[in-house]
Image: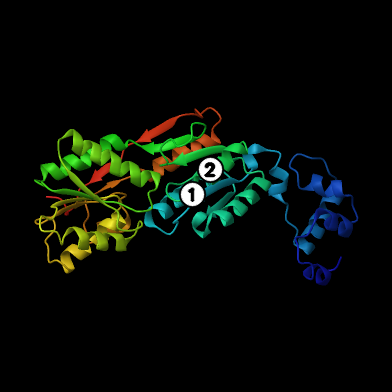
Amino acid sequence: MSNSRQSKNSGFTSATEVARLAGVSRSAVSRTFTPGRSVSDETRSKVLAAAEALNYHVNHLARGLSKEASRPVCILGGNLSSPYQSRLLEHLTLRLHKAGRAVMVINTDDGETSAKEALQKTLNYRSTATIVLSGKPPVSLIERCLQSGQQVILINRLGQFPHAENIDLDYSSIMKEAFNHLITAGCQRLAIVSSAARSPSMVVRETRFLEAAEEAGSEVTLIRPGNTSYQTGVLAARELLNQENRPDGIFCVTDLIACGFIDAARHEFGLNIPQDICVIGFDDIEQASWLGYQLTTFAQPLAEMAEAACERLLSPCVKKTGSQLFDARLVRRKTLR
């Protein structure tokens, strides 16, 4: 086969085409590219020359389908452009690539039907494991992964499925700490700004904060004016700060929401933070440390959580059931007295 003929071929060069050009058998091509297999020097030279002429590359994916350690890993998530999700995805993919695993990422933002089609492709490629990020991935997709016999690891999904493995945060102690810091700062009228997306991690942050307040005998206002976005924080500020007896201590379930709240409080209501109102966020995204915010927040140990998830995939000796809990560290900046 000539190079010009090969250039017209819309697909990848096959081992059969290499064998034909080299004048050897198909098995000889396979042996040439399989470490430890026997092949004569003459045959090897012919095969390598033909492979170079045809720009042939070994299909490691097909070769590895029978070996679990070579099969791809699927990562299922939505809102992947958000600072938190993008950082977590970066940690996961770098760790898996370092281990030699191919990664297939499915973005669920395009709707459940599209995500189901993409998930089926990963199953066709014999993906043996799926890591599900916190947020939007619908329950039906997770159920599909479990029914297919895949190893399923959920990050910040809080034990939704008994047969899945869970990487979670110890929200009971973290939210109690957030509540106590606002009380210690002298705040008397507290509010939670949450997300209408109602993802498992958003819901548990609300619930555990409210439980801490109830235990202390405090009342807390809870609002969910929009999805997990900067604009939701702006809307929350307009709703809460227009009240006659406005709150003086705010917990926002994400930093992005907190940034919107802070900007509106300062620029639309002329409030000083933290003198007039204290704000605590969650996630410690890059923007939280910017001079315009200096947001007090909780930092999730994303590198450690990603490492734990990957270890469950890569190490047969690691326990494959139950939840693994991590703590989030308070990063104290200038929005808390």
Give the amino acid type for the residue marked by disc 1 in the picture.
Pro
Q: Where residue 80 sits: x, y (%)?
A: 45, 56
Q: Is residue 320 above or below residue 56?
A: above
Identify which residue is drawn at 30% across, 63% down.
231
| Residue closer to the observer: 187 or 155 | 187
Q: Is residue 69 left or right of residue 85?
A: right
Q: Where residue 20 sits: x, y (%)?
A: 89, 57
Local crowd size for mark 2, using a 10 Å CA cut-off: few (<14), some (14–19), many (≥20): many
Which residue is label 1 attached to? 137
Local crowd size for mark 1, using a 10 Å CA cut-off: few (<14), some (14–19), many (≥20): many
Real-space CA distance between mark 1 and mark 2, rounded to the nearest whole angstrom: 8 Å
Work out whether residue 41 can be spotted. Answer: no
Q: Residue furthest front?
A: 244
Label 2 element class: helix
Q: Which circle's residue, 1 or 2, is located before the other in the chain?
A: 1
Q: Are marks 1 and 2 in contact (CB under 8 Å)?
A: yes
Q: Quadrant of the N terminus?
A: bottom right
Which residue is label 2 attached to? 142
Identify which residue is drawn at 58% across, 55% down.
113
Work out whether residue 71 can be spotted. Answer: yes
Q: Where residue 142 sits: x, y (%)?
A: 53, 43
